[in-house]
Structure formats: structure tokens, C-alpha cells
Image (cartoon, rainbow, N blue to C red):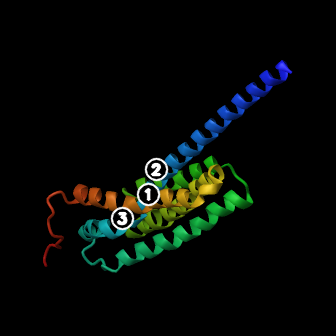
């Protein structure tokens, strides 16, 4: 009887350690998801930075139509929606490891943003910033939510609120930062000759 009690105590302690480790992994998943969604949430910065991108391309081509700003946003939103479908398909149907999905989508988004910063043509910028970045961000969007739900199945609403809240908060925080970075003096946007 004494041996059974010791084995039971050891098993209980091991189960308790496993539960603590699972909870820690779940919390780290949420923290990682918050960081990822803050990057993806920068998707909404286009409304803030578009005037600076317009002035950059207007300097290169004075005959450029201002309407291209709307094309970038449309392409970005459209390809982001395509990325949502790709990411959920890879996660649910193909059953790929979430790390692989994040590696593919994140690499595409970050690589496209970096390359777009060197784009000399408007079409190249539209393809890199709009299409490639949109697909990459969309692919990553659902992954931290699904992983968080698996760790906290009884608190799916809380997990969703925390992770998606960081997605929205990123536009606010980085919107202020991008304005400060691009226009530290707060000068009104103008075009030479106007």
C-alpha cells in the first residue's frame, strides 16, 4: 500500500508539472501571437504613410496620378484575404506545423517589405508591398489564434481578444511612430509647384 501511495504521489507531481509546462507554453504562444499580430497589424499603416510614398514617387515622375494610392490599398486588402485562405488551408487541411506556416508567410511579408523599400517603379512597389506583403501577412493571421485556442480551449474569447486586440493596437502605436519617423517636424505635405 505504501508503494502505491508513493507512485501515486509521484504521478500526481508529474501531472502537475506537465500542466504547469503546458500553461507556460500556452502563455508563450499568446505572447508570440501578440508580437506577430502587431507586425501584421502594420498592414493598416498604408493610410498613414501613403502621402509620403506618393511624394517619393511623384519626385521620380511628376505626371504620376494620385489615384495609385487607392490601388495599393485595394491590392493589399485583396491579397491579404487570399493569404487568409492560404494560411487556414495550410493549417487545417494540410496539417502543416504552425512554425512552418509562420516561417513561409513571415518570410514572404518581411522580404516583400524590405524589397519594396528599394522598388524604383510603381508597379514593382505595388507587387511587393501590395501583393506579396498582403499574402504573407494574411497567411500568418490565423495561426496564433488557432494555436492559442488549442492551449486554452475554455478561454477562446479571451485569447481572441488579446491577440486580435494587438492587431488593432499596432496601427495606433506604429501610426504615431511612422509619422514621427517620416515627418518629425510635422510639416504639411506639399508638392513643388503647387
Q: Nearer the viewer, mark 1 or mark 2?
A: 1
> Could you tell which of marks 3 and 2 lies nearer the N-terminus?
2
The CA span between labels 3 and 2 is 16 Å
Q: Quadrant of the N terminus?
A: top right
> Could you tell which of marks 1 and 2 lies nearer the N-terminus?
2
Q: Is residue 6 left or right of residue 69?
A: right
CA neighbours of label 2 inside 10 A, class few (<14), some (14 to 19), many (20+): some
- Cβ atoms at labels 1 and 2 below 8 Å apart: yes
Q: Nearer the viewer, residue 157 or 163?
A: 157
Circle 1 — which element? helix
* Residue marked by disc 2: 35
Q: Nearer the viewer, mark 3 or mark 2?
A: 2
| Rendered residue at 53%/55% (across/down) | 108
* Residue marked by disc 3: 45
CA neighbours of label 3 inside 10 A, class few (<14), some (14 to 19), many (20+): some
Q: Position of residue 113 (x, y in %)?
A: 42, 56
Q: Taking 53 as reference, is 68 above or below it?
A: below
Q: Nearer the viewer, mark 3 or mark 1?
A: 1
Q: Is residue 46 visible?
A: yes
* Residue marked by disc 1: 166
| Rendered residue at 37%/62% (across/down) | 171
Instruction: Determine the image quadrant of residue 60.
Output: bottom left
The CA span between labels 3 and 1 is 14 Å
Q: Taking 150 as reference, is 28 above or below it?
A: above
Q: Position of residue 102 (x, y in %)?
A: 58, 51
| Rendered residue at 62%/67% (across/down) | 85
Amino acid at each position: 500500500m505504501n508503494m502505491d501511495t508513493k507512485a501515486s504521489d509521484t504521478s500526481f507531481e508529474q501531472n502537475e508539472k506537465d500542466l504547469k509546462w503546458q500553461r507556460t507554453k500556452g502563455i508563450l504562444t499568446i505572447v508570440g501571437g501578440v508580437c506577430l499580430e502587431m507586425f501584421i497589424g502594420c498592414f493598416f499603416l498604408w493610410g498613414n504613410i501613403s502621402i509620403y510614398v506618393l511624394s517619393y514617387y511623384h519626385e521620380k515622375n511628376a505626371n504620376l496620378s494620385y489615384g495609385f494610392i487607392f490601388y495599393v490599398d485595394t491590392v493589399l486588402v485583396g491579397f491579404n484575404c487570399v493569404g487568409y485562405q492560404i494560411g487556414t488551408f495550410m493549417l487545417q487541411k494540410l496539417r502543416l506545423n504552425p512554425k512552418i506556416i509562420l516561417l513561409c508567410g513571415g518570410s514572404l511579408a518581411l522580404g516583400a517589405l524590405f524589397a519594396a523599400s528599394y522598388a524604383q517603379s510603381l508597379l514593382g512597389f505595388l507587387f511587393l508591398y501590395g501583393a506579396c506583403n498582403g499574402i504573407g501577412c494574411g497567411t500568418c493571421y490565423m495561426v496564433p489564434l488557432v494555436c492559442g485556442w488549442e492551449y486554452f480551449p475554455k478561454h477562446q474569447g479571451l485569447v481572441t481578444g488579446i491577440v486580435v486586440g494587438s492587431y488593432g493596437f499596432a496601427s495606433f502605436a506604429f501610426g504615431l511612430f511612422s509619422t514621427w519617423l517620416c515627418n518629425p517636424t510635422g510639416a504639411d505635405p506639399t508638392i513643388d509647384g503647387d
